[in-house]
Amino acid sequence: MAYIFGPVSSRRLGFSLGVDAVPKKWCSFDCVYCEVGRTTHKSIRVQPLVKAEAILTDLKKFLSTAGATIDYITIGGSGEPTLNAELGKLVSGIKSLTDIPVALLTNGSLLYYKRVRHAVREVEVVLPSLDAADEETFRAVNRPHPSLNIQHVITGLKELRQEYTGPIWLEVLIVEGLNDQLSQIHQLQRVIEQVGPDRIQLNTAVRPGTEPWIAPLPLKKMEEIKSILGHKAEIVASFSCTDMQKPWVQAESRIFNLLRRRPCPADEIARAIGLSAGELVPILDRLAREGKIHRHVHGGKGFYRAI
């Protein structure tokens, strides 16, 4: 299936079935920490990048054979989903197929467009990001399209809060040396207070990103930042679960499909695919020998990535 991946274990959404709404990698940002890799098509023009009908065909096929618990259908994947002009049609189509709640992962950069806010009004939860409150930090961390500025992002988030009745879970990702100074965090806190999200989900670079030099912040520093951001803030932790059911499609195909979207450690792959470590290791070894994946270490932990 070209547009569906997972379900994967998400730190924020439980078992999440991913939906790619744009080709890889169409985005309005080129974040230093992005696990998908460098942006190849940087754009702010909303256009019909992937037909909703094609995505819904994949989803319908998946749901007809699914054998695992799914907590959310999450629109996100290989780029910025709000670039797709058919996003609203996609959301409506998903809701006509299933009662599983729909979540939207977005960098928030295009929410200042009224048509984008209108397209996302039916999802059960919006998870935008905001990593900076000033222009210099914004450009250092998110490396946006030249036509974007931080005020676009902040304005869009504020207007979403005024119009959207569902929960907003704002992710803040901290990169050591770029947006971790206390003055930056205090400025960010003031802006977040104006936006008024329901949750503030504090994250750091726990996966390999676009730039090899990024590293996760120590827990002590994360706790300090959490205290500044206030009572709505939480440090998102690794999700764990033991009741994932066995895969309903070929394991190798699902593993490769997962790793094409993001690098993962072996334990996360095992949970997402529903295999024991003993079952998983030979498959990973075979894929590595065939030159389809490779393993590297980031932050002291081994990650697998599709080649």
Image (cartoon, rainbow, N blue to C red):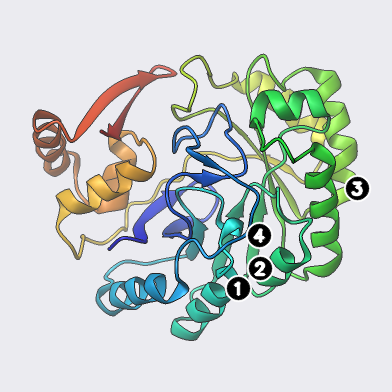
Q: Position of residue 259 (x, y in %)?
A: 31, 42
Type of the residue with mark 3:
Gln
* Element assignment for label 1: helix
Task: Estimate how packed mark 4 is, as few (under 14), some (14 to 19) or many (20 or more) residues with alpha carbons within 10 Å.
Answer: many
Cα distance in 3D space between marks 2 and 3: 21 Å
Q: Earlier in the sequence, mark 2 or mark 3?
A: 2
For mark 2, what is the residue?
120
The alpha-carbon separation of the residues under discs 2 and 4 comes to 8 Å
Quarter of the view holding residue 205: top right
The answer for how far apart the CA atoms under marks 1 and 4 are is: 13 Å
- Kindly identify the amino acid type of the residue bearing the numbered disc 4: Val
Q: Which residue is mark 4?
A: 126
SS assignment at label 4: strand
Q: Residue furthest bottom?
A: 96
Spot occupied by residue 21 in the image (x, y as percentages of width and height): 48, 60
Q: Amino acid at mark 2?
A: Val
